[in-house]
Image: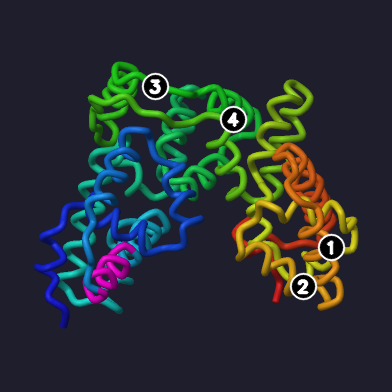
Amino acid sequence: MPDSRKKDTMSGAQKAAVLLVSIDPDAAARVLAQLDKDTVEHLSVEIARLEDVAREERDRIIEDFYHTAMAQQYVEQGGVPYARQLLERVLPPEEVTRIIETIEMSMKSSPFHFLQRADPAVLLTFLQDEHEQTIALILAYMGKNKAAEVLQGLPAKKQLEVVKRLSAIQHTSPESLAQVEHALERKLAAIVSEERHEAGGVKSVAEILNLADRATERSILETLEEEDPDLVDQIRRLMFVFEDIILVNDRGLQAVLREIDNDVLARSLKSATPELKEKFFKNMSKRAVDVIKEEMEFMGPIRLSDVESAQQKIVDIVRRLEEQGQVIIQGRGGVEEIIV
């Protein structure tokens, strides 16, 4: 068994640096884009300081990241006991304990961390009588899967109010968080955050609605559109972006391709990742692929706005065909919509 003590001599930032230089550059860039400026600068320094890393050590770090990421997903799905149970099937007991302890420490540093362990049904009952602003703030800091379950369990009128308030949240002061947590601690438990946190906003609404069932999503957006069509347009554009086409089923993508002009497809793929290009190409004939590649080559440099416009046209087609049932997007609306 590998000596895990050697791995533990590296700091978390050093491990993150090793991970970033070990994965595809495009993927690393997307990770960095999600981080704040100070963290990016810190990681950049660590990357610059990296010396030759032994392959075994690099592999251990990547494997550790994978198991930790999976454990966090398990925790969000079924809580810490569920995550521990699944990890024990594939990892030694000491590794399971270390990963779970790391995740629990991370949870305790987040506002409303105690809610991550609550059963969604119990949590829904607990939140039913809370003010819409309080519910929106809690959902902003909650795992997106659990937030989607809570949202779709609320009465329709309350759903709309929560979504509108969640869309408006940008930054929450520690004082406001402390007040809300203190009001809830008599029922569950609370941790008062001393840092300034960023959560909520239109992006959070889009992520939560992506995970809600389709009926809930449609009901909320259609009703909200009557009051604020601009907000609904923002939400829809964030709910499915061009890069998400990697999640479209092959048969659905073939239906999409039948409605796309060659010049639109060629422009849209100019900035696409190799994986996304391959997703398109494998659902096209060899002759069609050759035509698109040739058109991309002779097209030369084009404006980013033209690329984004072409990509948005394709996204709109995907959305329309999904509504018609011709496209299935992995992870949207739950497995109940897919009948095998």
Quarter of the picture holding the N terminus:
bottom left
The answer to whether residue 63 is magenta is: yes
Asked if residue 66 lies in the magenta stretch, the reply is no
Circle 3 or circle 1, nearest the eye: 1
First in sequence: mark 2 vs mark 3: 3
State the residue position of label 3: 172
Contact (Cβ within 8 Å) of mark 2 with mark 1: yes
Circles 3 and 4: CB distance less than 8 Å?
no
Q: Nearer the viewer, residue 30 or 229?
A: 30
Pointer 3 local density, CA inside 10 Å: few below 14, some 14–19, many at least 20: some
Q: Distance between the residues labelled 4 and 2?
A: 37 Å
Q: What stretch is highlighted in magenta?
A: 55-65
Placement of 19 over or under 88, stated as above or below? above
- Residue nearer the viewer, 221 or 270: 270
Q: What residue type is labelled 1?
A: Leu
Most common SS among magenta residues: helix
Percent of width and height locating residue 8 = 13, 62
- Nearest to the eye among marks 2 and 3: give it: 2
Separation of disc 4 and disc 1 at Cα? 34 Å
Residue to which mark 4 is pinned:
163
Q: Is residue 333 visible?
A: no
Tell me the number on the disc at residue 257: 1
Residue 177, image x and y in percent? 33, 23
Give the numbered dot on residue 283.
2
Callout 2 amino acid: Asn
Q: How crowded is mark 2: few (under 14 residues within 10 Å), some or many (20 or more)?
A: some
